[in-house]
Image (cartoon, helix red, strand yellow):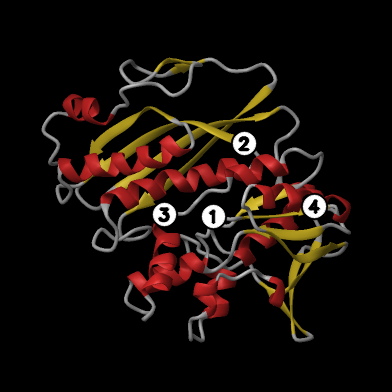
Amino acid sequence: MTIQDEFHFIDKIKQKNNRHTLLVEGIGDDAAVYQTKNDYLEIVCADTMVEGVHFLKDASSPKDIGFKAVAVNISDVAAMGGIPKYYLVTIAVPKSWSEEELVELYTGMDEIAEVYHMDLIGGDTVSTSDKLVITVTVIGEVKRNRQRLRRDARPGDIVFVTGTIGDSAAGLQILLGNLSVNDEKDRSFLVNRHKRPSPQVKAGQILSSINRVSLNDISDGLASELNELCEASCVKMVIEKDKIPLSDSIRSLNSNQLDEWILYGGEDFELVGTVSPSLFDQLQKQCNEEGICLTVIGHVEAGHSEVILLDDGNETKLHKSGFNHFK
């Protein structure tokens, strides 16, 4: 491993100032210590990114890799209706990564942490003989009884998504050299959507303001996340293909893989969920005021847990076949 002194490295990457007043002890002791609020619940989530599986060193800068490693966890907190507060990072570092590159990695993490007012409070650094492995744990909070869960969909609900879908998958294909995009503005937009996703924390906060919303973040693909909602809530969903919101950039592409990217591509880190139709207009208005696009794409029915896609009068069952590490 190219880090010569672990403690010197930790001094380089730790924050100079804490962003949260409830943080009692950050990096520098055996563990971090922070205070909690009586009327809030704690949220904890973790994700691991492996070089060659989740990112390619020659396709993304260390800053972009670090940024995304934290962003994917923030998105999980957003899907619970919560606010991210702290994060911990454990990395296994091979000799192919220099200390300078690792400092850049943590700089990318701090860039998104600053946006969401988060503190880095610990982790671990070890060596490995193979690829870089990054595990990020994010700790957040949600007001008691306002947590958003997958199991809260009900027959009669409408199905909605935030933002636009499929952009990240198209951006990945550009990076892999499988897709050529002549317009530089479209190319930049799609690649950036893959490298630097924007977790929908504000939307999650708005959606946590009412009594019942089911919610999931779109990490493994829209079809997969819809199936997870159906399974957790024991309901059926009917999705209208022409209502799925798409960006101008992805609409401009001439590819027979568009449906695959939109339905199964994943890593958009938007939110998908359900809510009573009587409350949707109110939520949509609040989201619009924050610059968030909230779009109805279908409805919930009683029945066997499944997702049906309507396309020009034709029905297709959408299977839970997003990204799976073990298939």
Question: Gap between marks 2 and 3, in whole Å?
Answer: 20 Å
Q: Are marks 2 and 1 in contact (CB under 8 Å)?
A: no
Q: Are marks 3 and 1 in contact (CB under 8 Å)?
A: no
Q: Nearer the viewer, mark 4 or mark 1?
A: 1
For label 4, the crowd category at 10 Å Cα-Cα, with few meaning under 14, some 14 to 19 and many 20 or more, is many
Which residue is the site of mark 4?
153
SS at badge 2: loop
Question: Gap between marks 3 and 1, in whole Å?
Answer: 10 Å
Residue 16's disc number = none
For label 2, the crowd category at 10 Å Cα-Cα, with few meaning under 14, some 14 to 19 and many 20 or more, is many
Q: Nearer the viewer, mark 4 or mark 3?
A: 3
- Nearer-the-camera pick, 286 or 310: 286
For label 1, the crowd category at 10 Å Cα-Cα, with few meaning under 14, some 14 to 19 and many 20 or more, is many
Which residue is the site of mark 3?
196
The first of marks 2 and 3 along the sequence is 2
SS at badge 4: loop
Q: Amino acid at mark 3?
A: Arg
State whether residue 317 is above or below residue 104: below
